[in-house]
Amino acid sequence: MGELKDASAVGEYGNPICGDLMYIYIKVKKQNGKEIIEDISFQTFGCAAAIATSSMITELAKGKTLDEAYNITRNDVADALDGLPPIKMHCSNLAADALKDAIKKYREKEK
């Protein structure tokens, strides 16, 4: 949890309706021709479910290739937490979307 000072990229995603805002920091390492998420952290401003999904996405993505991490879905996040109340499912969207945004920004920077 917290800002990753030497991040390769930072993803940001929020929901103006509920007020949740997430930042996902990734540090990417190139290894054997692959780009691996070596370290990942988050800053979340929002409800307990938003914080839980942010934390879980870091657990799911760390050590994965960028392609593997990009394919993590909101259902993957919710399932890893043993489910979320239907009213809080949008929180898992935020976490997955913030990670995708970080990966997208990293790839754009690397071009």
Image (tube, rainbow, N blue to C red):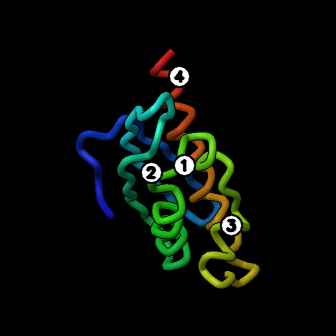
Q: Nearer the viewer, mark 1 or mark 3?
A: 3
Question: Nearer the N terminus, badge 1 or badge 3?
Answer: 3
Residue closest to the far top: 111
Q: Nearer the viewer, residue 45 or 17?
A: 45
Amino acid type shown at disc 4: Glu
Distance between mark 1 and mark 3 Cα atoms: 13 Å
Give the left or right position of residue 105, taking residue 88 as reference. Answer: left
Label 1 crowd (10 A; few <14 / some 14-19 / many >=20): many
Which residue lies under the disc numbered 1? Answer: 99
User: Mark 2 and mark 1 in contact (Cβ < 8 Å)?
Assistant: yes
Distance between mark 3 and mark 2 Cα atoms: 17 Å
Residue drawn at the location 36% of the way across and 35% of the way down: 8
Residue closest to the far front: 32
Residue drawn at the location 37% of the way across and 56% of the way down: 41
Distance between mark 1 and mark 2 Cα atoms: 6 Å
Q: Is residue 76 above or below residue 22?
A: below
Q: Position of residue 85 (x, y in %)?
A: 70, 84
Q: Position of residue 44 (x, y in %)?
A: 43, 62
User: Mark 4 and mark 3 in contact (Cβ < 8 Å)?
Assistant: no
Q: Nearer the viewer, mark 3 or mark 4?
A: 3
Question: Nearer the N terminus, badge 3 or badge 4?
Answer: 3
Amino acid type shown at disc 2: Ile
Amino acid type shown at disc 1: Leu
Give the left or right position of residue 104, taking residue 87 as reference. Answer: left
Which residue lies under the disc numbered 4? Answer: 108
Q: Is residue 69 above or below residue 53?
A: above
Which residue lies under the disc numbered 3? Answer: 76
User: Mark 1 and mark 4 in contact (Cβ < 8 Å)?
Assistant: no
Q: Quadrant of the N terminus?
A: bottom left
